[in-house]
């Protein structure tokens, strides 16, 4: 994959940063903006916008959209784990770094908790932001 990307992509991949890491950092920035003052008024470092109010829908639309999608994805993963354990769905096939389907089951469980938790946090933060802005 590194040979397919540009110079920036190769430099980021060399230090272990890929698109998912950048997306997660963007999500953390969004979540912090929902709960801090600089999410309601543009801070000084936003040169042309400094001191102006942030339009309410600017953080709300991505927070609701991403939060609901991540939350639903986490719920689906959390439902898949018990279904896989009781045999309703086929056991998870272990990809290369894993040695058994049990290892993959643990990964899916923790992934469901992480995605569901972060999605839920974004939705709660967006609801709180909306109440403060209205």
Image: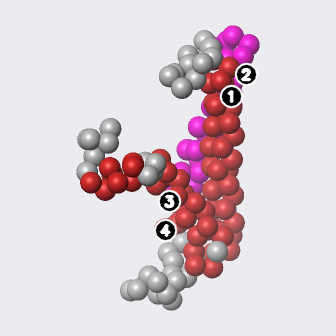
Res. 75 in view: no
Magenta-tinted stretch: 62-89
Of pointers 2 and 3, the one earlier in the residue sequence: 3
Q: Which mark is residue 82?
A: 2
Q: Quadrant of residue 121?
A: bottom right
Mark 3, other Cα within 10 Å: few <14 / some 14–19 / many ≥20: few
Residue 43 place in picture, x, y as percent: 52, 83
Do the residues bearing badges 4 and 3 touch, measured as CB atoms within 8 Å?
A: no
Per the image, the residue denoted by label 4 is 58
Of pointers 2 and 4, the one earlier in the residue sequence: 4
Of residue 3 and residue 109, the one placed in the foreground of this image is 3
Q: Nearer the viewer, mark 2 or mark 4?
A: 2
Residue 79 place in picture, x, y as percent: 68, 27
In the rendered image, the vertical position of residue 31 relative to residue 78, given as above or below: below
Q: Which mark is residue 106?
A: 1
Per the image, the residue denoted by label 3 is 26
Q: Nearer the viewer, mark 1 or mark 2?
A: 1
Of pointers 1 and 4, the one earlier in the residue sequence: 4
Give the distance between the C-alpha atoms of the residues marked 4 and 3, in whole angstroms.
14 Å
């Amino acid at each position: 994959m590194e040979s397919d990307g540009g110079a920036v992509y190769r430099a980021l991949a060399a230090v272990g940063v890929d698109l998912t890491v950048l997306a997660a950092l963007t999500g953390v920035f969004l979540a912090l903006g929902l709960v801090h003052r600089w999410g309601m008024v543009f801070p000084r470092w936003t040169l042309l916008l400094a001191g102006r109010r942030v339009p309410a829908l600017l953080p709300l639309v991505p927070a609701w959209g991403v939060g609901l999608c991540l939350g639903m994805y986490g719920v689906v993963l959390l439902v898949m784990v018990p279904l896989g354990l009781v045999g309703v769905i086929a056991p998870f096939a272990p990809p290369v770094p894993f040695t058994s389907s049990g290892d993959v089951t643990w990964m899916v469980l923790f992934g469901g908790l992480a995605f569901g938790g972060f999605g839920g946090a974004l939705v709660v933060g967006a609801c709180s932001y909306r109440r403060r802005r209205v």
